[in-house]
Image (spheres, grey):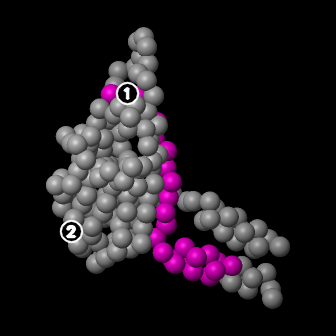
Amino acid sequence: MSPSQRCAHVLLLMFSVCRMSPVSCQNKVNASVGETVLLTCSVSEVGLALKDASVYWTDKDDNTVLDIIKNEPDLSSQSDRYKDRVSSFPDRYQAGNFSIQMKKVQLSDSSPYDCKVPQLGFRNRVTLNVSAKRNGPGPEPGPEPGPGPSGGAVVTLNSIHMTVLSVTVLSCFI
């Protein structure tokens, strides 16, 4: 097999692996008590699959942080610990952005949070680490975080993608 054929086969394999199912990503967010944070959740599968999407944000104890049912925030089952502190960006749902904003974070908010889109088999985990407020003068707090660059689109390569990409590049030179 020629190097160019090998490279083509590996690229095809990489494309197949990446298209098997939406990627589950893991992100970490650090904050101090009282800050506002953005917990990101972006799905690459856009279009008809997201027309009536249901998305479930939960914490480590399976408490409901926020449910989005058929592209509408649903606060009816939201845990009391998140009431009036968690919001989302409904104008970004159709683009696959189901990120949430959590205000006035507390030490007890330190937890992994899961964003699940069952109809796509998608799960995104964001780990929030909250530390005690800094003592002494510090920088003035900035504006509240928005949904992110490019309308909240977040592209994250996980370790599987990085491994496949590395093997692809290396195989083209062997």
Farthest-out residue, top = 136
Give yes or no for residue 169 being in the magenta stretch: no
Q: Is residue 14 toward the left or the right of residue 153 in the image?
A: right
Label 1: element kind: loop
Residue 149 appears in the picture as rendered = no
Picture coordinates of residue 17, whole percent (x, y): 58, 76
Q: Amino acid at mark 1?
A: Val
Q: Which residues are the magenta region? A: 10-34
Give yes or no for residue 26 being in the magenta stretch: yes
| Quarter holding residue 173 | bottom right
Q: Is residue 38 toward the left or the right of residue 7 in the image?
A: left
Farthest-out residue, front = 61
What residue would you read off at disc 1?
Answer: 33
Nearest the eye: 74 or 139: 74
> In the rendered view of the protein, which quadrant contains the N terminus?
bottom right
Q: Residue at x 27, y 40 (%)?
A: 81
Picture coordinates of residue 148, whole percent (x, y): 36, 48
Seen in the picture, residue 48 relative to 101 is either above or below; the reply is below
Q: Residue at x 41, y 21 (%)?
A: 133
Farthest-out residue, right = 174
Picture coordinates of residue 104, whole percent (x, y): 29, 32
Nearest the eye: 28 or 169: 28
Label drawn at residue 156: none
Q: Residue at x 67, y 64 (%)?
A: 163
> In the rendered view of the protein, which quadrant contains the C terminus?
bottom right
What residue would you read off at disc 2?
Answer: 70
Verify CB contact (< 8 Å) between mark 1 and mark 2: no
